[in-house]
Amino acid sequence: MACALAFSIVADAGAVEHPAKLAWHVERFDGGVVGSHDGDLPLNPASVVKVATSLWALERLGADYRYETIFALGGGLDTTEAKLEGNLLVLGSGDPDFQPENAFLVAGELNRLGLRHVSGDLLVDERFWIGWEGGTARREQDADKRVETMAVRLREALDPDRWTRELEQAWKAFAERRSLNVGERPQVVIDGRAQRYSARSEMVPLVIHRSQPLVDLLRRFNVYSNNDIDRLEFVLGPPQQLERFLADLWQGTDDGMRIETTSGLGRNRLTPRQTVRLLRDFALVCKKAGIAMESLLPVMGCGPSTLVKIYPGLHKSGLVNGMAAKTGTLTTTDGGVSVLSGIADTTGGKLLFALFTPGSGTRLRAARKDHEVWLARLVEDFGGMRPHSCPSVLPYSDERAVVSPAPVAE
């Protein structure tokens, strides 16, 4: 009966504006197909590609993987004067979510180890980033300029005398969260320039910053749909390798798939059916890692996210706590597209769904309303939502990061 009712969503769609443009596919968690409309039509999945990137990262690196950033001495450290006569060197490993708060942690540890003043330069390599860029569409394409920008940002974050209003606010929030004295600000003054480190010179590692675990990184990128998730390519490889990963995983069912970016920008292609397959594979990999898929995606009614921002009608209709989903939006590429794909835990069972409205660049609000009405009907057909408790509060980038002295070479 529920299956028949699910098909009525399309048949009885008169109240939904432009329902013919809505492509969708729904399956039970065990793989049974509930219904489909244009389910095998390759469409642009927009930011739902981030789920594929997250799946790839978990499989390749593991949920507990941490990025390491080394802060090293390029000269002699006089702990009596708390001064480095030489350069401070920063060697990254591609940490995609190093923020000013992480720099505050590092500055505090450098101070604790007797470093407050650098007579030379701050030299940063090409594997280090701080703050956001907005993905490939907004990224500085000149490699030298990009690294120099990161070096300047880090120098500002390390030295309160250079702080902007935003950095001041970030410090206050950081100190309050950690019960620190707001007036006792860590500080590392750099006398020289902030620039790219390319010439490998003799150095002594002093501090190692280890990022929060990968599972926390992925959750932050998915909840906020942050396009800088494509920084994961530094360790994982380019988008073509993600496409090969999915093709190997979906042997014989990957027709029409195309992955051009790991963030969802550009002209990617997945069918609604493949998108549901992606969600199931993601859920299985999460289960293997001992985590719930719902803890890595936005959950309706559980804290701020793109899901809550874009689909307020879902919250009003009571579809809360039992639904985790990834949004996708492009305004001009391929004429625009609005995508919503996720898992709804109904009293009639868990449902995996994928909704696409192609060509919706000029009518995004109407397309999202279509999705809200469609989902409300689907959940109603299956007996209503079965609510869950919310996942833990989304962590800050520094919350589970670890900063420690570098091991002493023997």
Image (cartoon, rainbow, N blue to C red):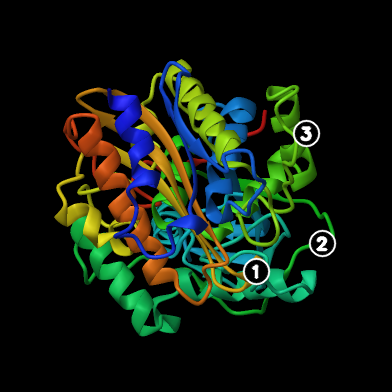
Query: Which residue is situated farthest in the right direction here?
Result: 199
Please state which amino acid type lies under the numbered disc 1. Thr
Front residue of 11/222: it is 11
Please state which amino acid type lies under the numbered disc 2. Ser
Labels 1 and 3: the sequence-earlier one: 3
- The quadrant of the image that shows the C terminus is top right
Q: Is residue 93 left or right of residue 276?
A: right
Q: Quadrant of residue 61?
A: top right
Q: Residue at x 39, y 77 (%)?
A: 160
Q: Is residue 304 above or below residue 209?
A: below
Task: Tell me the distance, in whole angstroms, between the alpha carbons under discs 1 and 3.
Answer: 24 Å
Question: Does residue 343 appear anywhere in the picture?
Answer: no
Determine whether label 1 and label 2 are within 8 Å by CB: no
Please state which amino acid type lies under the numbered disc 3. Arg
Residue 43 at what x, y percent from top left? 63, 51
Front residue of 132/92: it is 132
Task: Tell me the distance, in whole angstroms, between the alpha carbons under discs 2 and 3.
Answer: 33 Å
**Residue 198: which disc?**
2
**Residue 244: which disc?**
3
Look at the numbered disc 3 and give the secondary structure of its residue.
helix
Labels 1 and 2: the sequence-earlier one: 2
Residue 52 at what x, y percent from top left? 59, 39
Q: Which residue is mark 1?
A: 333
Look at the numbered disc 2 and give the secondary structure of its residue.
loop
